[in-house]
Every structure is written in structure tokens, then in C-alpha cells.
Amino acid sequence: MDWLGLRFGNELPADGQVLLACSHNTWLVLLAFLVASAAGYCAFDMAERVANAQQPENRRRWSWLGAGCLGGGIWAMHFIAMLAFEAPVSIQYDIPTTALSLLLVTSACLVGMHILGRPRITTSQHLSAALVIGLGITAMHYTGMAAVRSPATLHYQPTLVALSVAIAIGASLAATLLSAFFRNPDEGRHLLKIPASLAMGMAIFSMHFTGMQALQMTVPVGTALIPTATDNAQGLGLGLAVIAGMVLLFSLGVAWTDKKLQSKEIDLQRVNGLLRELEQVKVALQNVAHVDPLTSLPNRRAFNEFFAEKLEQHARHQHSLAVMFLDIDHFKRVNDNLGHDAGDQLLREVSERVRAALRREDMLARLGGDEFCVLASLENLAEAKALAQRIMEQMKAPITLAGRTFSMTTSIGISLYPDDGETCEELLKHADLALYQAKSSGRNNLHFFSRHLKNKATFELQLEEELHLALSRDNGLFLTYQPILDLRNGQVVKLEALVRWQHPQLGLLPPDRFIGVAEANGFIAELDAWVLRRACQDLAILAGEGFPDLRVAVNCSALNLCRDDLVDEVKHTLQAHDIHPRRLELEVTENALMSNVNQALYLLECMRSLGLCISIDDFGTGYSSLAYLKRLPLDTLKIDRSFIMDLPGSHADMEIVQAIIGMAHTLHLQVVAEGVESREQLDFLKSHGCDFIQGYLISRPQRLDGITDFLRQQQGSVASNVLPLRPNPT
């Protein structure tokens, strides 16, 4: 079979002579192998560029350049290897046929690059690309061999030709699979390109020399043979290799530059993406920083910024502005009884109701907890009052939480610009003072700020600072003691310690002037601890004066009953002054007990375990029940003076006192009547079984030295069987 002057078959002409003296130049063979390997390396790089090109136009350009590099490199390898072929006949090449071979292999490589440039390559596409490129290499090789012009006739063994075709297709399949492996930029994979390129060069090289092994050249008998000339072939081969190498290096340089540019572009895209994400995060953070997540209302920060802008506008146009502080009445009860989920639901409902009562231009913000604030542009007090009343009406509608339906109320404090302040801080502070006054007035109320409130707040602040200073320096505070008389034997068996404050400017202050200040500002525990220490010191002094069995009753604040460390504090104080616990009696008010019965019960039981006596003070003014009284570890009930002062003239008070005494004795409790000031009151109480009395009829509260004298006089009176009824005016 003949094709382009090539003869395929195993039979040679009978009149021919087989040329066996053909050889190859070793250096040119090695050069051909290096060119083939370089072409493979370049092909891998170009396939990567085609796959990673973002624009279709760039993908086409890289496909053309890759096809040129691969096809041109293989073609250069072929002809360098042909120049390495040494035969004893002259060999020349037909230029058009040679050009056709280059066109065939380049076209096949272009089709292969187009297939390999797809985002995802299937197995069938790999096979198609390998078949096209392999057949293109084979066609290039044998077309190039057809370009040989020589006296010899070229014969090919079909078996080896088929093997060369199989090697070309197999090498092409390996190349397509490796190009898919190398298309993802990775430093580790990049290093594997070199051995992979050498393997590809060897495969293409093997295909060429398998085809050359299939070649047999014959010449007619008598043909003159010429010596082999290698110098010209080496020069041509080296020149072709240099040209091919320069082209491949240039292509690799372009690919490397594009890779760097693409890497920078990818980095820039990542940076831009990060910047966009950061901008989104910034917007989200700003939203989080300015919006209350529970109610979706502006939070304190957003409110402060808006308030400053709003105040500046109103100052510029001389318009009035109302600042309203809202607080949900008894919100803590909802959280404690129904849980925090119900409390959150209530806050959301309140925010919706308040918004419904406002106008479009008014602002509502949640400042924290159950505190809300409204900014409203108003003309006068009447408009502010009408708006506040509208909000309060909205709040009164029934609400269902955790399966229970009830009504909520709110207290509102209002300050007005510019009458009540010219800065945000002043207006907010004054609205808060007005809110405090509204809650103090019974809740479900609104109150406007007034200068009286400011003066009162300033006075309380000053009083707080001075009380704190008096406690820290132990200066100005002192105890007075009021005797408590045992009606059964006429003896003073215990004293009630009452704290007083000798203020440097205001003079002598009773407890009701500063106890509330201490409770409101968080140092009532410190004040109670001071009273306890001083009472124990005085008990030790009284024991030394001859009254070792006398007891002292000290008051305990309601807030102190919530402190777990109160028991240890009392125990250490008693031990420090060597006071027997039975000489100390702890007085707690009825309302303090009932505000937190379970906690109070635990603490009082701990106190009883130490040996202290427990009494309930101001009994009858609170809302305790027999069910609680029988659970509490009490020793004494003290009847409030409001039930004693009208005895025996008030029939109702007489019945109440009799009932309390009877109930207390039924519960095995002793009874102390406070505020006894007349003999008639004493006779009534004694006739109805009251155990102890306390009041001006016995003695006014006195300091330690005065009470010591009183106790000595009392001992003499008892010795002479005279009841010590001597009011002391001091």
C-alpha cells in the first residue's frame, strides 16, 4: 500500500538492496528528546492557562498559543530527530509537504486544547482529545517522512507502524489526564510537571523512533553510496532546537506572566470580596450597635446620637421638646413568676403599644431592661400630658402571657426643653427624677420634672456622700437605747438599739431621714454591720457595769435578709466581742419578711441555730398570715405603736390588740407593745396579758451612759417594789 510515496508492507522489491548501515547522531537524538520534553511542559502550562482563563477571548488565545507550542515542539523534535538520522544516501525535504506536517499536528493540538479548556472534562472527552492529538502526531510524523526526497525508496512494516500509532494515542491520553491534574494551581503539583514532562517527552520520542524502526530504505543495485556528513545536520538541528526553545521559553514566560497577573487579579478579587464582606459586617455591626435585638427599637447609643441631633435642631428653631421616661410597673414580678421568655414577650408588646400611641415624627427607644424613652416635639405641657396619657391608656389593654391574662401599667417621667435643661444629660436626668417621683407616688402615674425634685435629689446625693463618709470614719453616728419592760416582774430585761446621726449642719437626724438613702444606694448592709458591732461593744460594756443578762435588740433591713453572708457576719461579730448569742435579738419588719419568705425563712433558721432571738417588728402594718407566722422561727411579736396610741379610747384598736396578743400566745410567742405613753395604756395591756412594753412611759431612747444610769435607778425601784415609770426628756 502506497501513501504520499510511502510503501507499507513486509515484502521488499526483488531488484532492490536493503540499506542496513543507517544510524543516528547521539547528541541530536538527546536534543530531540529535550525539545519533546520542553514541548510537553509548555503544553501543561498552556492547558492550565486555557482552563483558568476568565474570558472566552483569552481562552481562545491561549488555545492557539498552546496548540502552537505543543504542535511546533513535537514537529521540531521530529525534524531534529530526522537530522540525527544518518544514511549513506543524500536526503532532502519537500517544503510544502513539511509545512503540511506542521499544519496537521498544530490543528490536532488546537482541537485538543479546545477540549481540555472546558470547565469539566468527561472520560469520553479525554478519549476524544487523546485520539485527535495522537492521530495528529502520527499524521505529522508520516507526512514529514513523506517529505523526504532521496534516491532510496521508503518501506514501512505495518506492525511497527500500528505500534507507533498506539504509542502516540496512549501518550496523548496520558497528556490529557495530566493536564487535568495540573490545571489547579498548586505548588506541590507544579513541581511534578518536570518529571511528567520528561515522561511525556520520552513517550513522544518513543513514538518517533518506533516509526523510524518500522522504516526500511532500498536503492537500486548500483546506486552510488556517499559518506555520511553530520556537521551540517548538527548545525541545522541545533539551530532548530534553539529556535524551538526560544519559542517555548517565550511562551512559558508569557504564561508565567499571565499566571502572576491572574494570581494578582484573584488576590485583588479576594481583597475586594473581603472588603465587601467587611462592609457588610460593618453595616451589620452598626445595626447591632444601634438596634435593640429584642424589640427592634433604637438602643441607647442610637438614641443618644439622635437626641443630640434633635436637640440641636430644636435649639436652632427655638422649639420645645419633651423627653419621656417610661418604666413598666412591677415588671420584675412577671420575670420572677412567669419566666424571662414571658418578660421578653411583654417588652415586645409594650414597644408595639407605645409606638401605636405615638406620632410618626416621635422617636421611641429602649434604653435597657424595662426602660423606654420617647422624644416628642411639643408646644406645651398640655400636649405632653395628653401624649403620656394616651400611652398609659394603650398599656392598660389586657395582655396574655404564659396562658395568663392581666393588665399592665406604666409610670412616666417627663422633662421639657428648654425649661428643664439645655443638654441631653440634663433632660435625661431630670426625666429620670420625674419617673422616680411617679413611681414613688403609687405607680401608674405621670409626673413632670420640677426644681423641687432636683433640690431633693441634690440633697439626697449630698446626704449619701456624707453618710458614707460618716460610716468610713466612724464619726457622727451613734446608738441610743430604749428600755423594754417585762410586765411580769417589772424589770427592764432588754433594750432596743436605735441608730442616730449627728449631722454637722442638719443636727440630729432620726433613722427615717437616712435609712432610705442607705437602702437606695447599696450600703445598708454596711450601716447594719456598724450598728451590730457597736451594739455588741456596748453589750460588753454593760456586762462590765453589772448587767450581764441584759439583751439588746437590733434592727435588720429587708435588703439584708437577702444576703447569704449575713449569718457569718453576725457570728463573727459576736465572737469578736465575746457576746453570748442569747443576749442579741434580731428585729425584722413584717413587710421585710413577707417580701421574700423562703429566703428569710432560711436565714432566720440559721440565726436561731446560732442562739439568737428573733422578733417581728411593726406587726399589724403588713400583710402576713398565720400560715407564714407558724413557719417562721420567731420568739416575739412587737405590736406597732399605731394600734397603741388610741388605747383605751378606740374600741377597734382594743379588739385588734387583744386579737394579736391571743394569736401570739397561741403560737407560743411573746408580745411587746410599742409606743406606750400613758398609765391607762399600761393597765389595758397588762390586763390582757401583754408580756412587755416599750415607750416614753418607761423612758425615751438614751445614749449608753444615760441608759446605764437609768438601769441602776430601775434596779433600786424594783428593790422597793416601785414600777420605774419615769419619762426622761433627754
Image: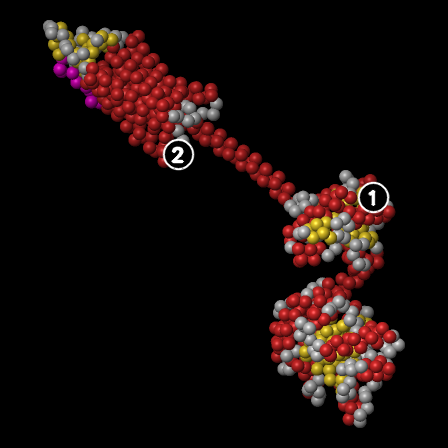
Secondary element at image label 1: loop
Q: Amino acid at mark 1?
A: Leu
Quickly name the residue at label 1: 378
Tell whether 686 sits left or right of 185: right
Quickly name the residue at label 2: 186
* Label annotation for residue 185: none
Query: Which image quarter is the C terminus in?
Result: bottom right
Q: Residue at the spot x=54%, y=33% of the render?
A: 272
Tell whether 14 sits left or right of 610: left
Is 243 magenta? The answer is no
Q: Which residues are magenta?
A: 19-27
Q: Is residue 426 above or below residue 678?
A: above
Which colouring convention does the figure follow?
secondary structure
Q: Earlier in the sequence, mark 1 or mark 2?
A: 2
Q: Residue at the spot x=84%, y=58% of the render?
A: 452
Residue 694, how many percent across, how many down? 79, 80
Q: Amino acid at mark 2?
A: Asp
Q: Is residue 130 above or below residue 694?
A: above
Tell whether 49 sits left or right of 532: left
Q: Nearer the viewer, residue 381 or 62?
A: 381
Is 22 magenta? The answer is yes
